[in-house]
Image: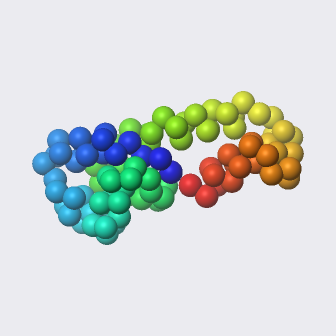
Amino acid sequence: MNIDAQQLKALRSAKAWTQQQLADTSGLSLRTIQRIERYGTGASESVLCIAAALDIDASTIISDQAFEVVEVVQSYSFAQLIGGVLAGGAVGAAIVLLLVS
């Protein structure tokens, strides 16, 4: 899942937390926090843990790109989505990304 690393850093800094403090509070490893802040990607479970630790809504740190995929998928009917998954097309790929994220 794409994460707004700059927003995450700003929120962490606003609490005057180190990466280690965020890791301890969220239950994630320091390496995971470092990787998310450096590369801007992480598992959806990590996003939820970080959001809970910072007492924010997870959407606050999810990048707009992730929402764009959701909007595209939501614009299709159920039959189109199933057809896309079966055909392995772009819509199918988007659904797989959502399910894996």
Q: Residue at x 17, y 41 (%)?
A: 14
How many marks do you count on the picture? 0
Q: Nearer the viewer, residue 3 or 53?
A: 3
Q: Which residue is at the far top? A: 75
Query: Residue 49: x, y in percent?
Result: 38, 57
The C terminus sits in image quarter? bottom right
Residue 52 appears in view: no
Location of residue 46 (image quadrant): bottom left
Query: Residue 13: x, y in percent?
Result: 18, 45
Query: Residue 60: x, y in percent?
Result: 38, 38
Q: Nearer the viewer, residue 27 or 12?
A: 12
Query: In the displayed structure, would residue 68 be above or below residue 23?
Result: above
Query: In the displayed structure, would residue 100 be above or below residue 80?
Result: below
Q: Nearer the viewer, residue 51 or 101?
A: 101
Q: Which residue is at the far front? A: 39
Q: Which residue is at the far left? A: 16
Q: Nearer the viewer, residue 15 or 88?
A: 88
Q: Residue at x 77, y 33 (%)?
A: 76
Residue 78 appears in view: yes
Q: How is the image coloured?
A: rainbow
Q: Residue at x 69, y 38 (%)?
A: 73
Q: Residue at x 62, y 38 (%)?
A: 70
Query: Residue 23: x, y in percent?
Result: 27, 63
Location of residue 29 (image quadrant): bottom left
